[in-house]
């Protein structure tokens, strides 16, 4: 496997049992998102930059799953997300850092809204149809391709009917893949177990809301 | 439906955790099929996000895939805990297979993490999460040596030697940690953007034994003959690979020619090797001998260690010429490093008597508690200061020396980068009331310690120890302590907060400075006679009052308040210690704020006389006094000197680039600012400076591109005004007029619009409220169009400028 390998002489090291986490001095100087928001609100540029850096990449990757390929070609997803983030952070002093999870959900929503606007705008243009007049099959976003447009819509709508905390926990766990420790911090839960419980409840509630969405659709 | 039923909880957990789910079994559980269907959709949503590269792996967020090897994938990732970029190598493991592979990778990762060397990629951690094992490490931007060779530029013998030396250090560090590399080749060595040579492994290699038909991507050609015969890898087989690498660097080919592993083996068995001077005739004979010995098929005749190989390589290389490190050579970190590989090969070197130039490297902190870092940093700082007053000795400044903090270093290399011939290094350990310090003065060229000493004293003796160290070094070099020599005599209760505050002031910016004020005040409370704390306090007040006060900048204080605070602190410092350079510099700052320019000049000159090695004084002199006075040539000379003694300091580099903007050398300034950006994109005031330089270089679109994403930040938009006008977006500027209130910013905006009346009106107001900013603004290109107007002279007069 790895090209570095222990030598014979290494066996003397093995007995010392180095099971400490390998990360060294690092954890000093790490600032919580909460603290960064506070600092950014008071006009600290560096804090703003760091918040930006911390959220930009994940949201860009996330957004690339939500934008159809043709739309991604037209409007660079990365730029779109960066622009949205800049717009959103412009109002950072109006943002109450109630919880870290709230910021994450807030930013995601901002990006999602922006994507929708972009799609609406671009949708009027003939780019969705290729030269031979055949509908381009990549008009769907990767997520839509994976589970179907209707299911995505149902999911997104149901998500909006959850409480803020439920929504935040779903986004953090299901979409962003946060650990329960991180979710506990983001949602202000005392333990990871409490965060897990909250996520479970939220998921069950979400499934119920989606079920209702199906019923409503069939009622129509 | 009862959601609390355990089977449902298990199912929910499985969806949330990405565990496999038997949906057939679930549909027969208590939940309704419609509900289970929605859960299926949710499981698919979760799977989608997990499988997309946006997922987290532990605390690391995968950003992009940068490589794929036989064993796994390599990503550029973001460490969310430490907020830094890392490279992450992910390898799939079967979680059910007894875990052997996983645990051996993790074990290896932990051993590797012990190798701390600037020429070896730093491993940060190793962990198994789910079915993947990850090894994450320093992310190095650069090109592999193989890519450099592919570029076709080729490397000359001197460059190969320089790279070889750095690689020897790297390999030696790996061996010292009890490890073997086993895959040294040009593909696994990067030349980082900063010029550093970094040994790494991105998993592109294959075990030759297992892949008899493997294509020759490099690896088998680098393997020692005994390995091909099935013997285990050793230190000397790594040396062989290193030798092949050097051979390849110099000649572009390999010692054996073969198309697959079998042919390599056969070539070795038949002794079919191409001597290096056959491959390339102009390889210097001595270098050829060294490489031939490294790749000797006979294990015993090969170099026994990387150090032994390094020693022979070093003999091929003359002493670096310190003079070449001057500003003219292009003083960026990258520029300096390029010089290190630019030597000509010579047979031997003779050491002429030279002027002593010393760098004090950050002392290693051997104390267990991490919060003692500031103490040890401060100790190093004080020794740098103390040596600064030794006559006839040049001392490299803090920022440059501290670039080597926490990096195990090779003294030769450090000396080359900093242009010094002497190095002071040491370690400190603080246990309760005891302080143990080891220190040595090394003559770099001969690699011999000229002096070393161990101190084991009480903590309160720290000042005496610092004194003794500088005394000993001065006497060893037959130099005398200059006029500025005096020791700090204070108590520890005052000294500790003082050191903390100094650290913060060095960070610059209003927020750290505001914290620094608190610590300086604590120090003064503990020892009201401690002069340096008052001088520091004056600097900190100046820093917090530099930016424009406003709702976004609560840290700032009003100029008149600042002025009296700076003044009383500086005066107090001077009163307590008339020979303290920092106290005179603080007075200089005070006078410049009071618009008493002649006194400002005198104070700064006195400070520089007393301690010429403090580059932050030169920077502050230039920005606060010389530039407003229009003494641009003198400012340039001083900044060049500062660059020489502090080549890696970004703030000196930034100041120099700014002087170039002021003197109309925009393109040079842009180059300089971009070099800083490459090293630290978040360096304060860099973006605005770069955009302004671009604007006046006639590149407004690029300028706007720099600032557009940052315009949400306060203090940015008015600097865009000129570029907007140039780019034909005047309407944007009209909007700025409405949203901006501060006269300083309005002056800049109106000047951009060409509205001279309003510009002068605003400028006049600004000259009353923020005179500390206007003196500089009058020299900056934004106000160039106003200079012919008689009202301009009136503003200068108001600021008492000639």
Image (cartoon, grey):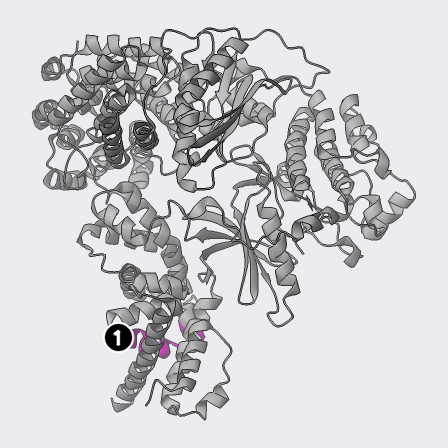
- Determine the residue positioned at 68% across, 41% down: B175
Nearer-the-camera pick, B693 or B732: B693
Position of the N terminus of chain A by quadrant: bottom right
The dominant secondary structure in magenta is helix
Viewed as shown, does residue B631 lie left or right of B654? left
Q: Is residue A148 magenta?
A: yes
Name above or below for residue A14 compared with residue B491: below
Q: Residues within 10 Å of mark 1 (few under 14, many from 20)?
A: some
Nearer-the-camera pick, A181 or B765: A181
- Determine the residue positioned at 68% across, 20% down: B317
The residue identified by callout 1 is: A162
Name above or below for residue A128 compared with residue B537: below
Q: Is residue A194 magenta?
A: no
* Residue B422, position as x, y percentages in the image: 55, 17
Range drawn in magenta = A144-161
Examine the rendering and report whether any part of residue B698 can be seen.
no
Examine the rendering and report whether any part of residue B679 can be seen.
yes
| Pointer 1 chain | A
- Determine the residue positioned at 84% across, 46% down: B226
Nearer-the-camera pick, B181 or B501: B501
Quadrant of residue A149 within the rendered picture: bottom left
Quadrant of residue B676 within the rendered picture: top left
* Residue B58, position as x, y percentages in the image: 47, 60
């Amino acid at each position: 496997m790895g090209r570095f390998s222990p030598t014979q002489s290494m066996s003397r090291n093995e007995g010392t049992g180095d099971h400490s986490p390998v990360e060294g001095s690092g954890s000093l100087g790490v600032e919580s998102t909460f603290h960064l928001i506070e600092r950014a609100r008071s006009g600290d540029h560096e804090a703003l930059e760091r918040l930006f850096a911390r959220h930009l990449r994940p949201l860009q990757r996330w957004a690339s799953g939500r934008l159809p390929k043709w739309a991604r070609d037209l409007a660079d997803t990365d730029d779109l997300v960066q622009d949205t983030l800049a717009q959103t952070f412009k109002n950072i002093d109006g943002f109450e850092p109630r919880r870290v999870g709230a910021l994450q959900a807030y930013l995601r929503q901002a990006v999602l809204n922006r994507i929708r606007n972009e799609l609406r705008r671009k949708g009027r243009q003939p780019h969705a149809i290729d030269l031979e007049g055949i509908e381009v099959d990549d008009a769907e976003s990767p997520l839509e391709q994976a589970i179907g447009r209707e299911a995505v819509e149902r999911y997104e709508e149901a998500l909006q009917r959850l409480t803020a905390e439920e929504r935040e926990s779903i986004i953090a766990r299901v979409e962003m893949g946060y650990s329960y420790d991180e979710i506990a911090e983001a949602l202000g839960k005392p333990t990871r177990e409490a965060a897990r419980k909250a996520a479970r409840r939220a998921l069950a509630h979400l499934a119920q809301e989606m079920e209702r969405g199906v019923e409503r659709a069939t009622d129509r | 439906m009862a959601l609390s039923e355990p089977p449902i909880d298990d199912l929910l957990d499985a969806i949330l955790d990405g565990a496999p789910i038997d949906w057939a079994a679930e549909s027969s559980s208590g939940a309704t099929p419609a509900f289970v269907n929605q859960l299926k959709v949710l499981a698919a949503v979760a799977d989608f996000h997990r499988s997309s590269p946006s997922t987290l792996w532990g605390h690391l967020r995968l950003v992009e895939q940068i490589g794929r090897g036989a064993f796994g994938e390599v990503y550029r990732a973001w460490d969310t805990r430490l907020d830094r970029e890392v490279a992450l190598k992910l390898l799939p493991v079967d979680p059910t297979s007894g875990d052997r592979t996983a645990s051996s990778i993790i074990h290896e990762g932990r051993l590797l993490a012990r190798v701390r060397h600037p020429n070896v990629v730093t491993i940060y951690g190793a962990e198994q999460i789910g079915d993947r094992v990850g090894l994450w490490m320093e992310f190095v931007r650069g090109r592999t040596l193989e890519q450099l060779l592919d570029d076709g530029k080729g490397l000359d013998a001197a460059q190969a030697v320089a790279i070889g030396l750095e690689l020897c250090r790297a390999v030696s560090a790996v061996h010292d940690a009890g490890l073997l590399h086993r895959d040294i080749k040009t593909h696994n060595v990067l030349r980082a953007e900063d010029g550093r040579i970094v040994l790494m492994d991105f998993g592109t290699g294959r075990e030759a034994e297992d892949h008899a038909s493997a294509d020759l991507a490099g690896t088998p050609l680098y393997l020692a003959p005994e390995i091909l015969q099935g013997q285990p890898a050793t230190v000397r087989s790594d040396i062989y690979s290193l030798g092949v690498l050097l051979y390849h660097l110099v000649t572009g080919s390999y010692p054996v020619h073969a198309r697959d592993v079998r042919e390599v083996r056969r070539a070795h068995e038949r002794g079919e090797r191409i001597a290096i001077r056959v491959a390339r005739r102009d390889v210097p004979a001595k270098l050829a001998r060294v490489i031939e010995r490294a790749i000797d098929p006979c294990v015993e005749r090969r170099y026994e260690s990387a150090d032994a190989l390094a020693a022979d390589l070093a003999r091929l290389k003359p002493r670096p010429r310190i003079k070449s490190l001057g500003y003219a050579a292009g003083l960026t970190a990258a520029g300096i490093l390029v010089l290190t590989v630019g030597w000509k090969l010579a047979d031997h070197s003779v050491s002429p008597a030279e002027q002593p130039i010393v760098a004090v490297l950050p002392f290693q902190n051997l104390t267990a508690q991490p919060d003692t870092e500031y103490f040890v940093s401060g100790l190093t700082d004080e020794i740098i200061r103390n040596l600064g007053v030794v006559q006839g000795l040049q001392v490299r400044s803090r920022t440059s020396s501290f670039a080597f903090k926490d990096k195990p270093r090779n003294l030769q290399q450090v000396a080359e980068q900093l242009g010094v011939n002497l190095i002071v290094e040491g370690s400190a350990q603080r246990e309760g009331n005891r302080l143990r310090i080891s220190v040595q003065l090394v003559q770099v060229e001969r690699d011999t310690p000229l002096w070393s000493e161990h101190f084991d004293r009480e903590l309160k003796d720290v000042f005496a120890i610092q004194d003794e160290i500088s005394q000993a070094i001065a006497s060893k070099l037959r130099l005398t302590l200059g006029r500025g020599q005096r020791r700090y005599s204070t108590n520890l209760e005052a000294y500790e907060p003082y050191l903390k505050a100094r650290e913060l002031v060095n960070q610059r910016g209003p927020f750290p400075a505001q914290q620094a004020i608190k610590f300086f005040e604590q120090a003064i409370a503990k020892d009201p006679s401690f002069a340096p704390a008052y001088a520091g306090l004056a600097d900190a007040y100046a820093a917090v009052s530099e930016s424009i006060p406003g709702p976004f900048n609560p840290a700032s204080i009003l100029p008149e308040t600042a002025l009296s605070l700076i003044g009383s602190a500086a005066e107090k410092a001077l009163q307590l210690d008339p020979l303290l350079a920092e106290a005179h510099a603080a007075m200089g700052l005070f006078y410049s704020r009071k618009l008493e320019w002649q006194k400002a000049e005198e104070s700064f000159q006195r400070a520089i006389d007393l301690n010429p090695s403090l580059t932050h004084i030169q920077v502050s002199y230039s920005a606060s006094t010389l530039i407003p006075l229009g003494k641009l040539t003198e400012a340039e000379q001083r900044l060049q000197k500062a660059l020489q003694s502090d080549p890696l300091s970004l703030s000196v580099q930034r100041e120099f680039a700014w002087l170039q903007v002021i003197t109309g050398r925009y393109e040079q300034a842009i180059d300089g600012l971009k070099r800083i950006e490459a090293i630290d994109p978040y360096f304060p005031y860099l973006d605005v400076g770069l955009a302004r330089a671009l604007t006046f270089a006639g590149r407004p679109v690029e300028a706007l591109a720099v600032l557009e994403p940052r315009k949400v930040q306060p203090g940015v938009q008015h600097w865009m005004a000129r570029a907007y006008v140039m780019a034909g977006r005047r309407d944007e500027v009209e909007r700025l007029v409405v949203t901006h209130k501060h006269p300083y910013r309005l002056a800049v905006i109106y000047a951009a619009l060409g509205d001279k009346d309003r510009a002068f009106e605003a400028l006049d107001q600004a000259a009353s409220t923020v005179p500390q900013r206007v003196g500089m603004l009058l020299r900056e290109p934004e106000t160039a169009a106003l200079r012919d107007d008689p009202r301009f002279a009136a503003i200068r007069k108001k600021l008492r400028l000639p």
